[in-house]
Image (cartoon, rainbow, N blue to C red):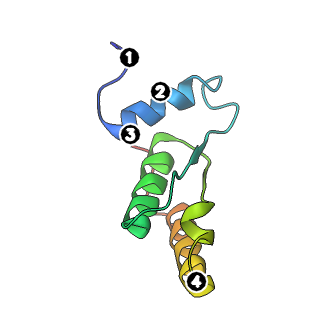
Amino acid sequence: SQLSSDHPIDLCRYQVANCYMGKIGLINSGGASGKNDFQDAVRTAVINKRAGGMGLISGRKAFQRPMEEGVKLLNAIQDVYLADDITIA
């Protein structure tokens, strides 16, 4: 497409544009649980935030593991959205 590149932030920004230019919040899904859940979840949250998204759904990545690990994962995602130094690209 001429409106976007292959960069994940650009692709997510294109999704935000399709949400009435951000008037409706974009919340991305975190996907299935895997071996790199912490890295994948934080990366997805950073991409979503930098593109103008509003949040990240994290179900299986957080809930298919011991409670302590799941809480750490959710806290890591929250930290991305609370961080002032992670801004819109």
Q: Is mark 3 on a helix, strand or loop?
A: helix
- Secondary structure category for the residue under label 4: loop
| Three-letter code, disc 1 | Leu
- Measured Cα–Cα span from mark 4 to mark 2: 36 Å
| Number of dots carrying numbers | 4
| Three-letter code, disc 4 | Pro
Foreground disc of the pair 1, 4: 4
Query: Which quadrant of the view contains residue 62?
Result: bottom right
**Compared to 60, does 13 lie above or below?**
above
Identify residue type, mark 2: Tyr
For label 3, the residue is: 9
User: At which x and y percent is residue 32?
Assistant: 51, 54
Q: Which of marks 3 and 1 is nearer the N terminus?
A: 1
Q: Residue at x 49, y 55 (%)?
A: 45
Q: Do the residues labelled 3 and 4 touch (CB within 8 Å)?
A: no
- Where, quadrant-wise, is the C terminus in this rendering? top left
Q: How far apart are marks 3 and 2 (CA)?
A: 9 Å
The quadrant holding residue 18 is top right
> Reading the chain from its start, which is encountered first: label 3 or label 4?
3
**Could you tell me if the residues under marks 1 and 2 are in contact, i.e. CB atoms within 8 Å?**
yes
Determine which residue is flagged by label 1: 3
Q: Position of residue 74 (x, y in %)?
A: 58, 71
**Mark 1 nearby-residue class (10 Å; few <14, some 14–19, many ≥20):** few
